[in-house]
Amino acid sequence: MATSWARLYNQDLFTQAGIEAAPTSWSELIDAATRLNEAGITPCAGSWNPSWFGRHFLSDFYSTEYEALTGCDGSPGQSPQDEAAAIKAGILSTDDPRFMAWWPFFKGLTDLWSPEYLAQELSVADEGAQEDFQAGQSAMFYSGSWIPRTLQTVGIEFELGSFSFPQLTTEDIEFATNVDVAGVVGGPNAAFQYAMSTPESNTTLEEEGKEAAVIDFLHYIGTPEVIEKVVNELGSFAPTWPGTTPVTGLETFAEQANTGLRVVNIGNSSATILPSWERLFGLYLSGNLELEEAANQFQRELDRGVQGYEEDNPDLDIDSCFAS
């Protein structure tokens, strides 16, 4: 199973603004937000978390280099070593025009949002935005698959809908690679998972018959019928195993699981990068920092993070990862 993220929307407010269907493209999303704004409706009071939206855009813009960006240490996906190497090589860096291109592009959407949350700390903004959405004071809210159940519990008085992050094209922005990145936020790493430890990491498996029993249990819990029942009983996540069906309202979230995860992001190679990213991104979106200065400050933080990574991992050679 997995948690996924999508744009939840108030169908009643969409109808009030004359919007007949959920957006399926970026231009339709901008058009919907504009029409809501013109109708006197707050289009969105939602989180602007750069780690979430950065994952969407960077996974798209760098999709053609995914193998290189995740091949530094041979482990699946993007590791901290992969990330640090790509930053130092000037790829996941402000030296690469793709890296910051999504900031002004995304600001074109957030300029239509409720401005009060753009200048707030993220956790505060998230809580206030959810309260506004469930009270019917804003039309859209970007969040996870547990929110529909939460909204049912509090007793919302509007029809709830959802749609995924739209697939970008070069007509939207020049660095788009026409890939589906709707599922890169959340995914299988964001909900509980069952796994079996190796004998090296879990000595309890040395007990005779225990390993076979664990495997047997995983076979049982992993069957479509059982996993669907277990996951849907909670109703906060979407079962993603082939042949399973989610509870009503989570169809959009389940659909995202049909696309392979090829995630490109930053923030795992150093504990200092993400807080700096959040601070600078918030200042930029709220109009308190120009893009060029944000890029300069961000690059300094990236360089500092890589330096710290190398100091903490003196035996790792990240320079050779992208050497040609």
Image: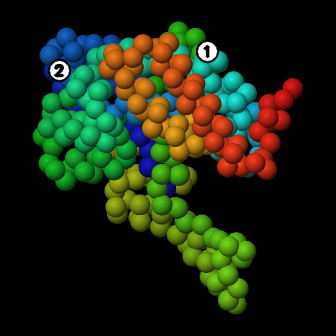
Q: CA distance from mark 2 to mark 1?
A: 35 Å
- Find residue 154 and report its horizontal and vertical position in percent: 16, 50
Q: Is residue 280 above or below residue 83?
A: above
> What is the residue that sits farthest to the bottom in this orientation?
208
- Find residue 311 and report its horizontal and vertical position in percent: 69, 45
Whether residue 125 sits left or right of residue 282 in the image: it is: left
- Find residue 303 and report its horizontal and vertical position in percent: 62, 30
In front here: 36 or 298? 298
* Type of the residue with mark 2: Ile
Query: Residue 49's mark?
Result: none
Write down the residue under mark 2. 41
Q: How is the image coloured?
A: rainbow
Whether residue 1 sits left or right of residue 269 in the image: it is: left
Query: Residue 97's mark?
Result: 1
Quarter assignment of residue 308 = top right
Secondary structure at badge 2 equals: loop
Whether residue 150 sits left or right of residue 213 in the image: it is: left
Quarter assignment of residue 25 = top left
* Type of the residue with mark 1: Pro
- Whichever of labels 2 and 1 marks the residue nearer the N terminus, that label is 2
In front here: 52 or 305? 305
Q: Are marks 2 and 1 in contact (CB under 8 Å)?
A: no
Image point (22%, 47%), residue name: 151
Image point (55%, 39%), residue name: 267
Image point (72%, 76%), residue name: 199
Q: Nearer the viewer, mark 2 or mark 1?
A: 1
Quarter assignment of residue 136 = top left
Residue 158 in view here: no
- Find residue 213 and report its horizontal and vertical position in percent: 62, 82
Secondary structure at badge 1 equals: helix
